[in-house]
C-alpha cells in the first residue's frame, strides 16, 4: 500500500478535527442513527438507555431507545395506520413511557393512546381525539392522561380502566371558574400538559395557561397550588407567562418543573414555591423550548430541549448531551421539537 501526500493531509485534517471536538466537547460523534453526542462523561452519568419520540420528520415519526453513544438499540417506526387518517399540525407522537412489563405506552396527539410490545405489536389502545401531552400507566392497571386543548367545562384530565371506561376525571370548574382564571383561553382553557398520580392518591397537574402547578385530591379539590409567575416575579426572565411543564414531586418533597416560557428549570419547596435551585438556559429565545425534566437516581437532572437531551450534575455541569441535528430551531418547527425523555438503567 502506498500512502500518498494527499491521503496523509486528509488523515491529518480528520485527526485534528476529531481532537478539537474532544477538547471542546468531551465528545463529538455522530451515531449511525443520526444523533450527535456532544459530551459523555461515563463516570458521572446515570448510565443506561434513553427512550423518547423522534418526530423530526413528521412523515416518519419513530420511538427510539438509544444508548449513551447515541446508537439506537430499539426503534419503532410508527405506522401511518395508527394516525387514523389524521396528520394535522398537532398530530404527533408526544409522551412515551416504558412499562414494567417491557411494553411501551405512547400518545399520538388528537388520536389516542397505544401500548405496544417489544416486537411493535399493538396490545392495547384507547381513542380520544382530545388526547394531548401526557400519559401514565398506574399501578392498578388504569391509565391517566391529559386533554390539553379541552375547552372550559370539558374534562382536562382523565383516568380510564383497561376497558377504556372513565373512572376519574377533572375539569377544574369548581376550582378555577373565577377571576383571574375564568376567562383565560390559549389553546384551550387550562391547557393541562402534564398529570401524574402521586403515591398518596392525589394527582399533580401542570396548568400551563394559569402558570400553576397544583395537587388535586380524589374529590377534585386543590390541596395546594404554586403560582410560578409570583415565585419568580423578581427574575429578569419573568413575563406574564411561565408555562410550566413536566412537574414532579421529588423524594425530598420539593417540586421539580420546567418553565418553558422562561427557559428555566426550577426546584421549589411546596406548597409556598420558594425556589431552592434554578437553572436558566443560555439562549433567551423561546425556541430553546425546555419542556421536559426529570431527576435521575444518582442526583443528576435530565432535561429535554427543542433539539437535544442533556444530563446535568447537581452543580449544573453537563455530563451528557445528545442532539438531533435534523431539528432546525425556529418558531415554525415547534411540531418537530423533542418533548420528553425517560432514562432507563441498564
Image (cartoon, rainbow, N blue to C red):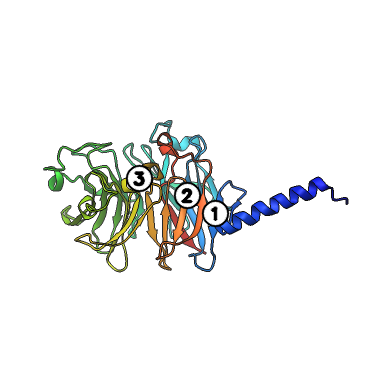
Of 58 and 321, which appears nearest the observer? Answer: 321
Compared with 184, 199 (above or below) is: below
Q: Position of residue 142 (x, y in %)?
A: 32, 54
The answer to whether any part of residue 68 appears in the image is no
Earlier residue among tags 2 and 3: 3
- Between disc 2 and disc 3, the foreground one is 2
Determine whether the residue tagged by mark 3 lies in a helix, strand or loop: loop
Of 92 and 22, which appears nearest the observer? Answer: 22
Compared with 331, 66 (above or below) is: below
Mark 1 lies on residue: 38
Give the Cα separation between the discs numbered 2 and 3: 18 Å
Q: Position of residue 62 (x, y in %)?
A: 50, 43
Give the number of the disc on residue 308.
2
* Label pair 2/1, CB-CB below 8 angstroms: yes
Q: Residue at x 55, y 56 (%)?
A: 25
Mark 3 lies on residue: 133
Looking at the rendered structure, the number of numbered marks drawn on it comes to 3
Amino acid at each position: 500500500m502506498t500512502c500518498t501526500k494527499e491521503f496523509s493531509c486528509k488523515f491529518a485534517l480528520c485527526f485534528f478535527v476529531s481532537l478539537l471536538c474532544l477538547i471542546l466537547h468531551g465528545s463529538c460523534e455522530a451515531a449511525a442513527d443520526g444523533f450527535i453526542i456532544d459530551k459523555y462523561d461515563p463516570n458521572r452519568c446515570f448510565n443506561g438507555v434513553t427512550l423518547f419520540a423522534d418526530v423530526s420528520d413528521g412523515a416518519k415519526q419513530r420511538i427510539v431507545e438509544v444508548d449513551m453513544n447515541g446508537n439506537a438499540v430499539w426503534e419503532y417506526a410508527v405506522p401511518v395506520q395508527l394516525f387514523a387518517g389524521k396528520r394535522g399540525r398537532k398530530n404527533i407522537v408526544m409522551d412515551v413511557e416504558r412499562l414494567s412489563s417491557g411494553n411501551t405506552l405512547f400518545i399520538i396527539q388528537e388520536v389516542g393512546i397505544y401500548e405496544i410490545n417489544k416486537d411493535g405489536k399493538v396490545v392495547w389502545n384507547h381513542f380520544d381525539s382530545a388526547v394531548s401531552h401526557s400519559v401514565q400507566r398506574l399501578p392498578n392497571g388504569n391509565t391517566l392522561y391529559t386533554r390539553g386543548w379541552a375547552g372550559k367545562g370539558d374534562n382536562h384530565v382523565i383516568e380510564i380502566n383497561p376497558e377504556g371506561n372513565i373512572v376519574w376525571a377533572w375539569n377544574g370548574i369548581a376550582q378555577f371558574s373565577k377571576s383571574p382564571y375564568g376567562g383565560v383561553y390559549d389553546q384551550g382553557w387550562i391547557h393541562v400538559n402534564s398529570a401524574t398520580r402521586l403515591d398518596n392518591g392525589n394527582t399533580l397537574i401542570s396548568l400551563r395557561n394559569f402558570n400553576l402547578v397544583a395537587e388535586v385530591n380524589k374529590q377534585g379539590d386543590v390541596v395546594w397550588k404554586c403560582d410560578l409567575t409570583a415565585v419568580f416575579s423578581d427574575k429578569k426572565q419573568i413575563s406574564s407567562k411561565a408555562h410550566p411543564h413536566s412537574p414532579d414531586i421529588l423524594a425530598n418533597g420539593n417540586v421539580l418543573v420546567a418553565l418553558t416560557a422562561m427557559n428555566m428549570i426550577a426546584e421549589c419547596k411546596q406548597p409556598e414555591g420558594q425556589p431552592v435551585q434554578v437553572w436558566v438556559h443560555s439562549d433567551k429565545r423561546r425556541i430553546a423550548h425546555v419542556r421536559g425534566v426529570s431527576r435521575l437516581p444518582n442526583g443528576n437532572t435530565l432535561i429535554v430541549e427543542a433539539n437535544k437531551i442533556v444530563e446535568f450534575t447537581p452543580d449544573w455541569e453537563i455530563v451528557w448531551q445528545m442532539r438531533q441535528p435534523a431539528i432546525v430551531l425556529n418558531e415554525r418547527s415547534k411540531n418537530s421539537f423533542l418533548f420528553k425523555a425517560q432514562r432507563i438503567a441498564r
